[in-house]
């Protein structure tokens, strides 16, 4: 049974799921918005908020953890420079998920996960 497990499986093995979330988090921080499915957006929200919390902390250990997770090293440095002025007054809830129906004929829903 999967009671109270934090990360959804997303129908992928652990290594592919980890790489998918790392890539989506990197893209979300770089672009500010990512178009993805509902389940992936929910999983992405936790990872992105964790990286922003590390950036708000600003310590060397937090920076090294973020560099180990986010693919682009320069992106990590820019995130750490701008995090306090952008998210300094918030205690959480850095990401926002919006539902957008892609086409009226298709029953699929696409979520936009955007930072800020």
Image (cartoon, rainbow, N blue to C red):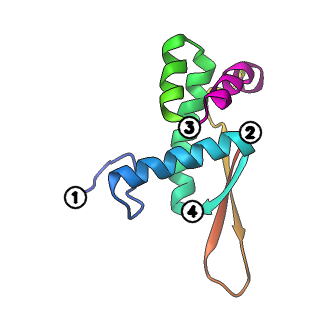
In space, the residues marked 3 and 4 are separated at their CA atoms by 23 Å
Circle 3: element type: loop
Q: Are marks 4 and 2 in contact (CB under 8 Å)?
A: no
Circle 1: element type: loop
Image position, residue 95 (x, y; %): 66, 42
- Examine the structure image and report whether residue 6 is included in the region drawn in magenta: no
Is residue 112 shown above or below 115? below
In space, the residues marked 2 and 3 are separated at their CA atoms by 21 Å
Q: Which of 94 and 54 is in front in this view?
A: 54
Is residue 64 shown above or below 98? above
Q: Which of marks 2 and 3 is in front?
A: 3
Tell me the tag on residue 71. 3
Tell me the tag on residue 1. 1
Part of the protein shown in magenta = 71-87
Of the image marks 2 and 1, the number of the one nearer the N terminus: 1
Q: Which of marks 4 and 1 is in front?
A: 4
């Amino acid at each position: 049974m999967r009671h109270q497990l934090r990360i959804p499986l997303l129908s992928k093995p652990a290594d592919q799921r980890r790489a998918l979330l790392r890539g989506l988090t990197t893209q979300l921080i770089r672009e500010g918005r990512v178009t993805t499915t509902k389940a992936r957006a929910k999983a992405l929200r936790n990872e992105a908020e964790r990286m922003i919390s590390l950036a708000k902390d600003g310590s060397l250990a937090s920076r090294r953890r973020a560099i180990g997770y986010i693919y682009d090293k320069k992106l990590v440095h820019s995130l750490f420079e701008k995090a306090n002025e952008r998210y300094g007054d918030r205690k959480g809830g850095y990401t926002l998920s919006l539902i957008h129906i892609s086409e009226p004929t298709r029953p699929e829903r696409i979520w936009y996960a955007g930072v800020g």
